[in-house]
Image: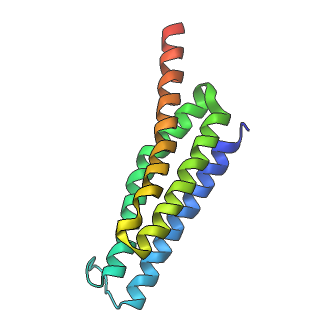
């Protein structure tokens, strides 16, 4: 369980690659030439999935590693897997229909919030003890 955050980090990198691939594929399929970021709604959904995933990753990875480093390695890894499942669900739903992205987003936020709480407890516990 102590190495679970590392696995989650690798899965996060694969998720980021998957969103990158989806945007590239959509660019070709819908003939959206760089640097354009608008055009066909299906391309725009793929682009938003990629950007939203990048934005969430910036908040998620630091809290994952803070939680793991300050006494919650196993639980942080489990919360990280919840985040991964939520983000994959979010991405697949959003690519189909933007209105269906909510449940995956909510699950991902639960995973992130759990890592944030664990990170906060861990850091404050160490600071209080000294």
Q: Where is residue 91 drawn, in percent x and y? A: 47, 66
**Residue at x 53%, y 32% (from the top left corner):** 66
**Where 82 sits versus 33, above or below?**
above
**Residue at x 42%, y 48% (from the top left corner):** 58
Q: Where is residue 18 drawn, in percent x and y? A: 53, 70
Residue 22 shows up from this direction: yes
Q: Where is residue 53 drawn, in percent x and y? A: 43, 59
**Residue at x 56%, y 59% (from the top left corner):** 13
Residue 130 shows up from this direction: no
Callout count: 0
- Is 88 or 68 nearer to us in this picture? 88
Q: Where is residue 102 drawn, in percent x and y? A: 40, 58
The residue positioned farthest toward the top in the image shown:
129
Colour convention? rainbow
**Residue at x 49%, y 9% (from the top left corner):** 128
Q: Is residue 33 left or right of residue 25?
A: left
The image quarter containing residue 100 is bottom left
The image quarter containing residue 101 is bottom left
Q: Quadrant of the N terminus?
A: top right
**Where 88 sits versus 72, above or below?**
below
Q: Is residue 64 left or right of residue 43?
A: right
């Amino acid at each position: 369980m102590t190495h679970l955050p590392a696995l989650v980090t690798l899965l996060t990198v694969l998720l980021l690659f998957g969103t990158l691939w989806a945007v590239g594929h959509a660019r070709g399929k819908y003939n959206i030439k760089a640097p354009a970021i608008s055009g066909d709604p299906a391309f725009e959904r793929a682009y938003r999935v990629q950007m939203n995933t990048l934005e969430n990753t910036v908040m998620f990875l630091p809290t994952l590693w803070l939680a793991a480093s300050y006494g919650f390695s196993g639980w942080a890894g489990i919360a990280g897997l919840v985040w991964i499942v939520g983000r994959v669900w979010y991405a697949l739903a959003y690519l189909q229909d933007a209105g269906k992205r909510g449940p995956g987003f909510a699950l991902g936020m639960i995973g992130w919030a759990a890592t944030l709480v664990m990170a906060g407890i861990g850091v404050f516990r160490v600071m209080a003890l000294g």
